[in-house]
């Protein structure tokens, strides 16, 4: 979220939706510099990594066992740095496939052909490689 109140509202909504999970809390980006290593999940939902934008997020400290979710498609510094540190990286393309599969199932009542969807993205040069 770009605003602290929106981030807080998202954390509260997630806590209500998943009461059996520990509640997350929002923190200003500057507070994460060097401390992102303590987070279980780090999400890049910014324009950083898109063509014409900043190439990387400053001060992110990844570690093994952490989840790093990059909503940007393609090879980004965020994903490369998280991978190098041993974090489990979820790339934008994987999100695209999962969202599409979920929508397909909701709309049709049928299981989504995820392998076909991944193959189509790979042919287009945009797909997840795993």
Image: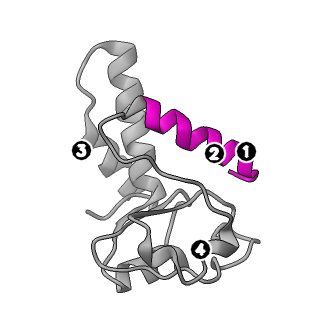
According to the image, label 2 marks what residue? 8
User: Which residue does the image show at 29% across and 78% down from the upper left?
Assistant: 64
Q: Upstream in the sequence, badge 4 or badge 2?
A: 2
Mark 4 residue crowding within 10 angstroms, few (<14) / some (14–19) / many (20+)? some
Q: Upstream in the sequence, badge 4 or badge 1?
A: 1
Q: Upstream in the sequence, badge 3 or badge 1?
A: 1
Left or right of 119: which side holds 4? right
Q: Position of residue 62 (x, y in %)?
A: 43, 79
According to the image, label 1 marks what residue? 5
Of badges 2 and 3, the one in the foreground is 2
According to the image, label 4 marks what residue? 32
Q: Quadrant of residue 68?
A: bottom left
Q: Are marks 1 and 2 in contact (CB under 8 Å)?
A: yes
Of badges 4 and 3, the one in the foreground is 4
Q: Secondary structure at mark 2?
A: helix
**Viewer-proximal residue among 116 and 55:** 55
Q: Which mark is residue 115?
A: 3
Q: Quadrant of residue 87?
A: bottom left
Q: CA distance from mark 1 to mark 2?
A: 5 Å
User: Which residue does the image show at 70% across and 69% down from the upper left?
Assistant: 51
Q: Upstream in the sequence, badge 4 or badge 3?
A: 4
Mark 3 residue crowding within 10 angstroms, few (<14) / some (14–19) / many (20+)? few
Is residue 8 magenta-colored? yes
Q: Are marks 4 and 3 in contact (CB under 8 Å)?
A: no
Residue range of the region highlighted in magenta in the rendering: 1-16
Left or right of 89: which side holds 116? left
User: Which residue does the image show at 76% across and 51% down from the upper left?
Assistant: 3
**Viewer-proximal residue among 7 and 128:** 7
Q: Are marks 3 and 1 in contact (CB under 8 Å)?
A: no
Vertical order, 66 against 14 (above or below): below
Q: Quadrant of residue 15?
A: top left
């Amino acid at each position: 979220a770009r605003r602290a109140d929106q981030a807080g509202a998202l954390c509260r909504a997630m806590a209500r939706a998943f009461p059996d999970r520990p509640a997350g809390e929002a923190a200003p980006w500057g507070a994460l510099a060097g401390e992102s290593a303590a987070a279980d999940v780090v999400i890049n939902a910014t324009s950083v990594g898109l063509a014409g934008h900043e190439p990387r997020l400053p001060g992110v400290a990844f570690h093994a066992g952490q989840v790093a979710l990059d909503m940007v498609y393609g090879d980004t510094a965020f994903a490369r740095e998280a991978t190098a540190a041993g974090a489990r990286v979820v790339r934008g393309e994987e999100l695209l496939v999962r969202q599409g599969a979920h929508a397909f199932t909701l709309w049709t009542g049928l299981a989504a052909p995820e392998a076909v969807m991944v193959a189509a993205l790979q042919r287009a040069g945009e797909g997840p490689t795993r």
